[in-house]
Amino acid sequence: MPSTRDIRRRIKSVKNTRQITKAMELVAASKMKRAQQSALAGHAYAMLMSEMLGALESRIEGFEHPFLTPRPVKTRGIMLITTDKGLCGPLNSNLFRLVTEIKEPATFVTAGRKGAQFISRTKRNLAADFPISDKVNFSEVREPAQFLTKLFLDGTIDTVEVMFSWFKNTLVQVPIVLPLLPIANLHETIAAIRRQKGIAGDSSRPDSRQMLIEPSAAAVLESLLPLYVNREIHQCMLDAKASEHSARMVAMKTAKDNASSLLDDLTLEYNKARQAAITQEILEIAAAQMASAGQ
């Protein structure tokens, strides 16, 4: 049995760990609420923009654009959105498992230090790494979105896909790969996004309502396509941040509860060891008194 001094040291260490995990849980919880509100508020806007593009496409005959033209896929372009820090459970490892399942040639653009470290460590092709703050301002998204778009238009990559943790609720974050470019069929793309994200509604059919579009449907569609890519990447980053803070809060709460449970066990063990030591001392005193009385 360990000595009472060793047990006291372990109790002090566990108390310090519990204090740290509790503080991290509170910080993550405060950030989580704001991140969740931002992610959920953006879903409706992102889907409305997708439906608007689908409605415009259905009203144009013979419109050609590089974003809408399918091509043979030789190299996939994937944006991997991860966290900058750890201690968020299996959030990053679930994304890394999706990366390891990719057997085709791929070029990666990362947002988050953990993703950049994993891509470099596994010797995959990393084109660029972009920092993203907790607020995820739309201005921060423009640079990585324009970088991906330029690679796509130059022919360096043949697809633009986003790999991120989609925020479903506080306890569930789903790793998914969202295809953005090329958009072979906007209606099918919108329906696929809805299925992946579990959003109800049928958007696979074109919008048949009468609309007056100025200056023209082609001009509006050409202006909205780059904004659509930027907005979808922004929404993915908002979901990733909400998932990060939710997963970290749950992980730190679990760690705090485990520390409390371990602390109870150590306290019980300490009390038993202390009681055994006291009992041993009493027995030794009683034996000494009996020995002296016998003399």
Image: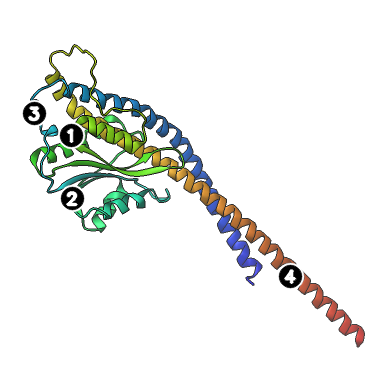
| Location of residue 172 with respect to 280 vertically, above or below | above
Query: Of the residues shown, which amino acid type is indicated by label 3?
Result: Glu
Dot 3 corresponds to which residue? Answer: 64
- As drawn, the label of residue 293 is none
Quadrant of residue 182 within the rendered picture: top left
Residue 20 seen by the camera: no
Q: CA–CA distance between discs 1 and 3?
A: 12 Å
> Badge 2 is on which residue?
106
Name the side, left or right, on which 114 lies relative to 226.
right
Q: Which dot, 2 or 4, sits closer to the camera?
A: 2
Circle 3 — which element? loop
Judging by the rendered image, the residue that carries numbered circle 4 is 276
Residue at 76% over, 69% down: 278
Q: CA distance from mark 3 to mark 4?
A: 85 Å
Q: Is residue 52 above or below residue 113?
A: above
| Residues marked 2 and 3 touching at CB (< 8 Å) | no
Q: Position of residue 157 (x, y in %)?
A: 13, 44
Residue at (55, 51) in percent of width and height: 18
Tell me if residue 250 can be seen: yes
Q: Which amino acid, by three-letter code, is at mark 4?
A: Ala
First of labels 1, 3 by sequence position: 3
Sequence-wise, which precedes: disc 4 or disc 1?
1
Q: Secondary structure at mark 1?
A: loop
Tell me the CA gap for discs 4 and 1: 74 Å
Q: Nearer the viewer, residue 35 or 270?
A: 35
Q: Residues within 10 Å of mark 3 (few under 14, many from 20)?
A: few
- The reply to whether discs 1 and 3 touch (Cβ–Cβ < 8 Å) is no
Look at label 1 and name its amino acid: Ile
